[in-house]
Amino acid sequence: MLNDLDVLILGAGMAGLSAARALAERGIRVCVLEAKPRVGGRIMSQKVEGGGFVELGAEFVHGRAPELWALIDEAGATTVERHGSMLREQQPGHLVEDDPQDNAMFEPLEQLENPDQLEKFAAEDQTFAHWLAASNVPTHLRPALTAYVEGFNAADAQRISVRSLGIQQKAEDATQVDRSWNLPNGYAQLPDYLAARVKELGGEIRLDSEVLNIRWTPGNVLVTTTHGDLTAPRCIVTLPLGVLHKVNRPSGIPITPEPAAIPHARRLAMGHAARFTMVFRRPYWQLTQLFDPQTMRTLNFLFAPSHNPPVWWTSHPDPNALPALTGWAGGPRASALEGKTPDALGSDACATLAGIFALDEHLVRSDLIATYSHDWSADPFALGAYSYVPAGAVDASSAMTQPEADTLFFAGEHTDITGNWGTVHAAIRSGLRAAAQILKETAAT
C-alpha cells in the first residue's frame, strides 16, 4: 500500500492530468490512476499506415479558449484552421452549396443568450423540443435546428435544457467558437505532453489500474484498484459522467459513503455519438460532376440529413493528411450506428456516399483503404461521448464542484461552470479548478 501521497487522482484524461500537473508544480505528491493502458481519456489518436493520424475521440479545437491554446503553444503542437466549402442535402438526391455567411438557422439559438431570455428560463427551464414547439421559429427551420442541437451536443432534444443552450451560446461567442482547428500530429500529443510533465515533476501515473472500490472518511481516502490499495488525504475524481451514473449501482464503482456530488451527477445526462473515419487512396469525391472542381477540392463539411450519419467532414485543408471522410451522428441517431464494426460502418457508408456524390459505388469501395472507429457508449470506462444538461439541471455542475469534507473533489467536463460542457477546454478548466481548491486548503492548513 502506497502511503506517502498527498493527492490521488482518478482518471488520466485532460481534467486529471491538468490537475496533476498544477499540483506537482507546487510540490504536491500526486498519483494518477488510469484504467486504460494509455492517457488521454476521450482523446484517442490512432496512427495510420502511410502516415498521419485519425481521431477516434475529440478532434476539433473549438474557438480560442485560453487554457487550451496555452497548452497547445507550450507543447509546440502544430494547428491547421479549418475552412472550405460546405455542401447540404436540401432534399434527398439534391445537394446545394451552403453560404458560409448565412447564419439564419442559428439566430434562434443566439437569441437564447439574451439576458432577458436567460432570466425567463431561470424560473422555469424547459427542454429544447418543448421550447421549439411553442416558439415562432419558422417551421421549415425546425428540423435542421433540432438536428444541429442534437448532433453538436450529442443530446436528445426532448431532454436538453434551453437555458443551458443559452449559457453555452454566450460562452461560445466569447471564445470565437465559429472558428475551429485540427492538430495534424494528433490531439493525443496534448495529454502525452501533460503526462510527461507530471512525471518530470515527480508525480506518478499508473496505467491499467482500474478502480474497484473507494472508501473514505474526512482526511483519508482508500482506493482499491486491480493492482492493490492506495491511500491519500485527498482525492480528485475525474471519472466520466457515464461512469459516475453507475456509482453504487450494479457493475458500478462503490463509493462509501456516497458523496453529495453523485446525486447531482445523475441529474446530468451523458450524450451519445457515433463517429468513424474512412481513409481512401484518393479524394474520390472530387470526381463528382455535381459541383465545380474548386468546390470539391476544398470540401470541408457535408450535411446529409436524410442519411445516417447525417454529418461528414474531410481532412481539408491539411495538405499532408491522407484523403479521409469522417461520419458523425450525435444524439438519438447515434444508436442506429452503435455496436457496428468499422468494416460494417465503412461498407454501408460506401453505398451512401456513392449515392450522395452520384458516383459509381464500385469506384468508392475500391478506393477505401480502411475504416476506423471506437464505440464510446460501449466503452466501460466512458459509457458515452460527453455530457449535456437536461432541463432543470443547470445548477448540477456547480453543485458538483463543492469539495466533500475537504477530502473528495470532482472534476471533468461535466463539472464545468463556464457553459462549455463537453469540450476539452472545459475538462482542462475543471482540473485546474480542483487543483486550486486543494492548494487553497493546503495553504490554509
Image (cartoon, helix red, strand yellow):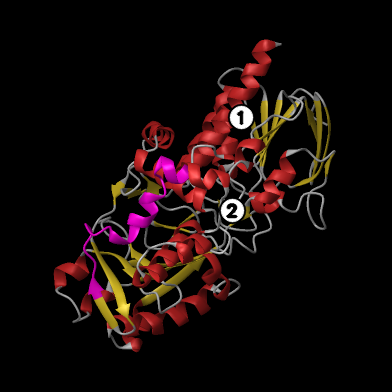
- Residue at the image point whose x is 69% and y is 58% from the top: 380
Figure check: 435 above or below 293: above
Amino acid of disc 1: Ala
Label 1: few (<14), some (14–19) or many (≥20) C-alpha neighbours in 10 Å: many
Mark 2 and mark 1: span between their CA atoms? Answer: 26 Å
Residue range corresponding to the magenta coloring: 96-118
Q: Which mark is residue 434?
A: 1
Residue 121 numbered mark, or none: none
Pick the residue in front: 113 or 146. 113
Residue at image location 14% in from the left, 74% down from the top: 292
Residue 360 position in % (x across, y down): 30, 88
Q: Is residue 328 left or right of residue 25?
A: left
One can see residue 209 in this view: no
Q: Which residue appears at 38% of the width and 76% of the height?
A: 368
Name the residue nearer the viewer: 387 or 22. 387
Give above or below for 8 relative to 334.
above
- The residue indicated by pointer 2 is 391
Q: Does 111 lie within the magenta span?
A: yes
When asked about the image quadrant of residue 73, the answer is: top left
Residue 84: x, y in percent?
Answer: 23, 60
